[in-house]
Image (spheres, rainbow, N blue to C red):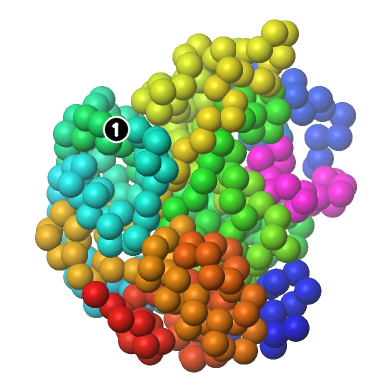
Amino acid sequence: MHEGVSRRGLLALAGGALANTNPLTVIRAAAQVVGAELTDEQVSEILFQEAEPGGGPVNRATIKPFWFQKPEGARPAPNWPPDNVSFDFAHIAPLPNSEQPFELTSAVLQQLLAAGSFKPNPQSTKVLLGLRGCMLVEKTDHTDWASGHQVRATRPNHLDLRCLFCVWDMTTNRLALFKGSTVPNVDYMEKQIEGSMKSNMLPTGMHQYVVGAHNGVRQPAALIQKTPVWVIRSKKTLGYAANDAGIEWDDLEGQLPFDDIHAAILNTRSRPPYFSSAGCQTIAGAYDNGLPTGAWAEFRKAAGLAHPLNFLGSSRTETGDDGRQFDYVLLTGKEAQIAAAGSHGPLRTLRFGSSGELVSALQEKLGALPEGAKVGKSGVFDAKTLGGVLRWQKENKLSPSGIIASDAAAKLGLIWS
């Protein structure tokens, strides 16, 4: 066993219960009153139901109140770390930050995919993207199809919907955007620290998803995570800073974290929480008697999924779209802004989901190191490769981002063209 990696693949990196309530009744009641203010009990039940699988409480009566149930003065503030210690931004930390609007176009998206060596399925006409820390300039939760949209880079705060989702039609070079979040909310983060529930942050990269039911009848025809990946956990602070002692990368023993893409459900509330994510990617919207609503409905339609849902037989979970596959590229608003400004060099990286000859070269370099034989030589930056990169970064006292940028490439002896 490699030093610093436990049996479960945890890579430690220094630096009132509703026991008598039918959960399905609560979820259905909440979903049927679209736009209504949910009670604390309804919100709590939704949070329990949306918890990371395998990390829920055995006895809810022993669980402390959620963050949102505490008096405002007793709520610790979540935080987003400075770029130089952020898993997502450390490789571009030297570049200036700006919240000035820029145009997000298919040309920008093409540059981002090329810079990351991401190669979506050539048989797919539509690619899904998430931009962590990015917002529409217009005060709306989604856009229609267009060749470009005005957006601005920002940072998530684990409270508000401060990310964008994009459906990119590569046959027409048009895109549609949708308001959402790609990070866990503070309620689950606090429960992770307490040790009663789990939460995680999905790393950037290209992931694969398949249409299916998220939490059974509660969210049919959502997008279900398909590829295992290491995820980031924060066990001491309400943030994800790479130099925090409580940060761990977890490989989940090769199992899925089930960071699905689904409706936020709570975004119409007047106070937090505004989304129900322990690690899932959530889009503004809900369900009304089994019918997707809001930006979530428009996102699904843009992706080419049936609206209303095409249920099979008497089933309320299986639909005719189940099994359809999508590539999902998760990056950041700052990276999109850099690409839009024409500065492509700093964006060159290898990370989860990258593929090609340069990934093969990376795997060969890692394979020559202790424990490196476990990486393989597939030419695809998969979970095993991510684990090898994280071990190498830790051993060389580099930021444990899981991302290979120019400095790390040079240290490994990769020819960075």
**Residue drawn where x is 64% and y is 75% of the image:** 374
Does the magenta segment cover residue 43? no
- Horizontally, residue 335 falls left or right of residue 226, namely left
The residue closer to the viewer here, 42 or 303, is 303
Nearer the observer, 363 or 352: 363
Q: Quadrant of residue 81?
A: bottom left
Residue 300 in sight here = yes
Q: Is residue 53 magenta-colored?
A: yes
Is 2 situated left or right of 166 in this image?
right
Which residue is drawn at the image coordinates 19% and 38% (left, top)? Answer: 149
> Where is residue 53 shown, x and y percent of the image?
73, 47
Asked if residue 76 is positioned above or below residue 9 in the image, the reply reads: above
In x, y percent, where is residue 277? 57, 45
Point 60% across, 82% down: residue: 372
Q: Which residue is mark 1?
A: 169
Please report the bounds of the magenta region as a residue range.
47-71
Q: Residue 282, image x and y in percent? A: 50, 40
Question: Which three-letter amino acid code belongs to the residue tagged 1?
Answer: Asp
Are there few (<14), some (14-19), or many (20+) residues within 10 Å of tag 1? many
Rendering quarter of residue 412? bottom left
Residue depicted at x 25% and y 48%:
109
